[in-house]
Image (cartoon, grey):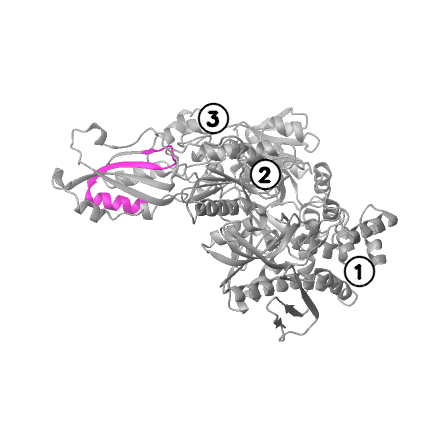
Amino acid sequence: MWMCLDSLLNDTPMTDHNDGRVHIELTVTGVVQAVGFRPFVYRRATAHDLVGTVRNTGDAGVKISIAGTVEDVEAFIDDVRERPPPLAVVESIDIETHEPVDDSNDRFQTFEIVSSTQGDGGSGTIPPDTGICDGCLEDVHDLNSRYYKYWATSCVDCGPRYTVIESLPYDRPTTTMESFPLCEGCNKEYTDPGDRRYHAQTIACPACGPSLSLLSDDRTELATGTDAVTAAGYRLNAGEILAIKGIGGTHLACRATDQDAVSDLRERTGRPEKPFALMAKSVEQVEQFARVGQEERPWLTDVRRPIVVLETLGGSALNRDRDWLGDVAPGLHTVGVMLPYAGLHHLLFDQLDEPLVMTSANLPGKPMTLSTEVIYEELADVIDAAVVHDREIAARCDDSVVRVVDNSRRFLRRSRGWVPRPLPRQETGPAVLALGAEFDTTVALAREDEVVLSQHLGDVDGPGTEAFLEQAIAHLKELFRTDPAIIACDLHPEFVTSRLATSYASDLPGASGPTNPIQVQHHHAHAAGLLAEHDCDRAVVITIDGTGYGPDGTVWGGEVLDVTRNSFERVGGLEPFRLPGGEAAVRYPARTLASLLNDAERVDELIADQTPLSQTEATTVRKSAEAGVNAPLTSSAGRYLDAISALLEVCTERTYQGEPAIKLESTAASGTPLSLEHELEGNTGHCYRDADKYAGMIVTYALYDDRPVIETSRLVRHIDRLHTSYSTATVAATAQAALAEGLALIAVQAARERAVPWIGVTGGVAHNVAISRRIRDVVEDRNFRFLSPDQIPPGDAGISYGQTVVATAQANARGE
């Protein structure tokens, strides 16, 4: 809330004495702790000849008590509001007037930073981690600096925040830096109002700060300090695989252009095909192997340093003798790249001329490792050495991942650099804790007018991940001092998060006996999150992903929904088809073709060729699908794309989540889709024909449970016939376009019938740029307004946010 000081003071008699001096108290909320805000306030207050105090409060706010002339106070407030420190975000300033102070008041002789106080909680914001600033980087490379070659150099404008904060208010004793008392040099800078590190809680130097060590594969200490960095660089250049403990967790690193090292890393981690992220020394180095457009460059260099998904170049300037990018991201036309964001990274790259693979240090099904003990418990057979430090990580936090789509950033993963920055809560209500889905999981805490999304938790169905999930929930509740009144979860009864939600709900204040959480259907959560992000009350939303438990007990995933925050109606989508063997069909998508192709002999051959099954077993699978035995129904767009990927032999076995569809997208990137003709007969009885296009392929529709659906089986058979005349890239592009146009046209028809002006798209398949863009084009060409995710990842990482939206709306509708 901005308040006009002129009107506030003019309405009071407080300036009638003491030479026109005033005494006011400001309560500032936003991102104002752990960002150098108090030192900034000190400098601006003294510059304006003000006296008083500033302190952090336990609710992550800042309280300022100042006295001075009206003119000086107004100028000070203007500085606070308009020119805060680089990492600060001032969301509100509440002003309270007091009786003017006289010269005998000891509290108002100077301006001071005073001890923090506890608060009731609720209004403040904890800052995320940021990359090292230019000033600190200069110190790291300055031979005359106390911070020369010190790996953990930081100041009030940069460095770890969220990952070192254990509780509030933010002061060194409430962070993991408490274990490192300041030396004389650091204390001098910490207490010098004119210094960049004045009250920088993470200040540290080689004399007093966290220490760095290089350990061998048997945990023998090989080197420390700058020698550890030098030795680590040598080992990386020699082709070794290193664990590198950083700010929010640990990476596994090797030289990206070293085929043997990358191959060894894949074998040791059990990731035969999963794309690895890269860290490059500079934008100029990235431009040697990837396209960096004017839209991508700002995100690469952003102070938060996310991984940015970029299209690769046809021929890399690095090691032109072979396709090293094919080893890093097999079968893909893109690669995820980030720039160094910690002093340690920059020091390593002082010795390296090529990019590094930097992938999360964890085995499949386990969370990223944090401590030296766990590194050697779980990764001893993976690494040749480890770079570790003795600063504890309070909150595990993976790298964020973004992609630029149509000149706008889209999150694939919202984590380091953004978490725990709140998102707006468009509809206020009781505090809600939402536990998300089971894959790419996040949890969300909705309170007052904001929603706090957790860091990336990953897949929580593996060993150790449930404990991580519970730790993340406890950490959020502690930092934001919020006890939920409502628990929300996915509709799927077997999800770990659903079972845990039932336990949490039973422990709610006032609960007597078993209490049920609010169960939110998966695709309703996707769509409701999109609505809330755009402050929209109702839209027709295309929700496309791999799987989501439907109210009818089938697997949804290719849906057109008429959605409000409180409810939804299924108004169209893909015609359901069978998944022979259930999860087996997800791993081997050729199985799905058994229910989509009507050529029995060809289906048997495809299944036998692309799965471990014999010809006889393949025939049994096909007959089971035909009979509907052990073959659940699905309308999943993800499974449709997987089937096309198998049909075109792009990817015949899924080794990581989304692999067949992701590789299909890369194959389609070099193709141009054929023109499509649509015959859409809805329940209104009218027919839509896209007459301005040449009919390269006809997409047909039917009514299923009184809603228009794309005839999935017929579509796949059409695509199969195309493959005899066109390239794989052309057919792949056409298959994607048919899905996108078909669902978009169903959505347009539904929106027209219901007089709904908004049409949106979300879900994991919305990560596919070509599909998302084609849907947008169809929607906007027909004069509807288009919604797409911006602040929230379209995949399952955004489910928890959507669950808070639905739970809040339903609770408010019930008057809770």
The residue wearing badge 3 is 207
Could you tell me how far apart the alpha carbons at marks 3 and 1 are, in whole angstroms?
A: 73 Å
Q: Residue 598, labelled with which disc?
A: 1
Position of residue 132 relative to residue 795, above or below, is above
Where residue 498 sits: x, y (%)? 59, 38
Which one is earlier in the sequence, the residue at label 2 or at label 1?
2
Position of residue 303 relative to residue 210, above or below, is below
* Image-quadrant location for residue 64: top left
Bounds of the magenta segment: 55-80
Position of residue 769 relative to residue 474, above or below, is below
Amino acid bearing label 3: Ala
Q: Describe the element under mark 1 as helix, strand or loop.
A: loop
Q: Residue 473, labelled with which disc?
A: none
Is residue 150 among the parts visible in the rendering?
Answer: no
Amino acid bearing label 2: Ser
579 to the left or right of 474: right
